[in-house]
Amino acid sequence: MESKSTATDLVSDADRVSEAAVRELLAAERPDDGLLAEEGSSQESASGRRWVIDPLDGTVNYLYGLPAWCVSVALEDADGGAVAVVLDPLRDEIFTAERGGGARLGGQEIHVSGEERPERALIATGFSYSADVRAEQAEVVARVLPRFRDIRRAGAAALDLSHLAAGRLDGYYERGLKHWDWAAARLIVTEAGGAVAELPGEPAGLAAASPALLPKLLELVC
């Protein structure tokens, strides 16, 4: 087990094994496609398509034995996200989406909750492993918490967004993410009828909710 961005941001053998398994499958089945993966695998695309992989989203949860981690795989083309899969193996749940084809959980169509009122909305977020960034994020929580029903922090962005798509959460926001954290789940949210906005000032922060709720969340997190 090693650390990544900080001493508390960990990577495990399971991350590497999972990434290698996906990489080998894609090399056999889609050799001309590009690849971007969290643990360093990369390949330029000769087909105009690229796979974006988070082989184990929620590594710290996995290492602590907490049941909130998943595998996230997205296919992108020139128009953005095309196909998405988020697998929660512990719950035997698979969230999927294809552009223009809707979002599903285990084959059943899913939709965001449609909640419009902040005081009735359950919001999820996540925190950086950098102490300075966490201090800034605590200030945002102090603004959000009094206005919304409550806040949850599960520790896996792809799962949070997938649960939002399935109506288990009403909103989500987080700064400090990487593209592979949300490449699959973002498409799942939008195909489930949700709205997504990139947070200003960084390349990969996101907020997501039902279309009517998202502007009210953005007022507090931007």
Image: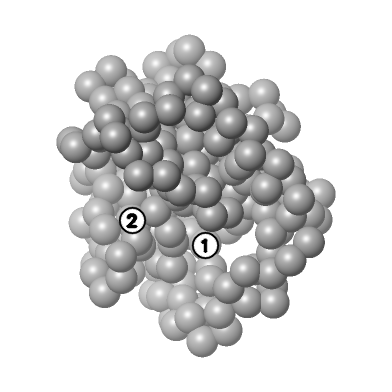
User: Which numbered disc flags the more N-terminal residue, 1 or 2?
Assistant: 1
Q: In the rendering, at what x and y percent does residue 144 appear?
A: 40, 68
Q: Indicate the position of residue 4 as horizontal and vertical percent values.
A: 62, 69
- The residue located at (55%, 35%) in the rendering is 23
Say which residue appears at 81% left-offset and 49% top-offset. 65
Give the vertical position of 33 relative to 11 (above or below).
above
| Kind of residue sitting beneath label 1 | Gly
Which quadrant holds residue 187? Answer: top left
Mark 2 neighbour density, 10 Å: few (under 14) some (14–19) many (20 or more)? many
Query: Quick one: SS at disc 1?
Result: loop
Q: Nearer the viewer, residue 218 or 105?
A: 105
Q: Residue furthest right?
A: 65
Tell me the element at label 2: strand
Q: Is residue 135 above or below residue 105?
A: below
Protein image colouring = one colour
Pick the front one: 179 or 188 = 179
Give left or right: position of 9 versus 157.
Answer: right
Task: Please say whether residue 127 is visible from this viewpoint.
Answer: yes
Three-letter code, disc 2: Ala
Mark number displayed over residue 15: none
Q: Residue 126, image x and y in percent?
A: 52, 62
Q: Where is mark 2, residue-wise?
A: 207
Tally of numbered tags: 2
Query: What residue appears at the point 52 percent right and 38 percent down from the top-left corner?
Result: 72
Residue 25 position by quadrant: top right
Q: Is residue 154 visible?
A: no
Residue displayed at 31% across by 70% down: 202
Residue occupied by mark 1: 126
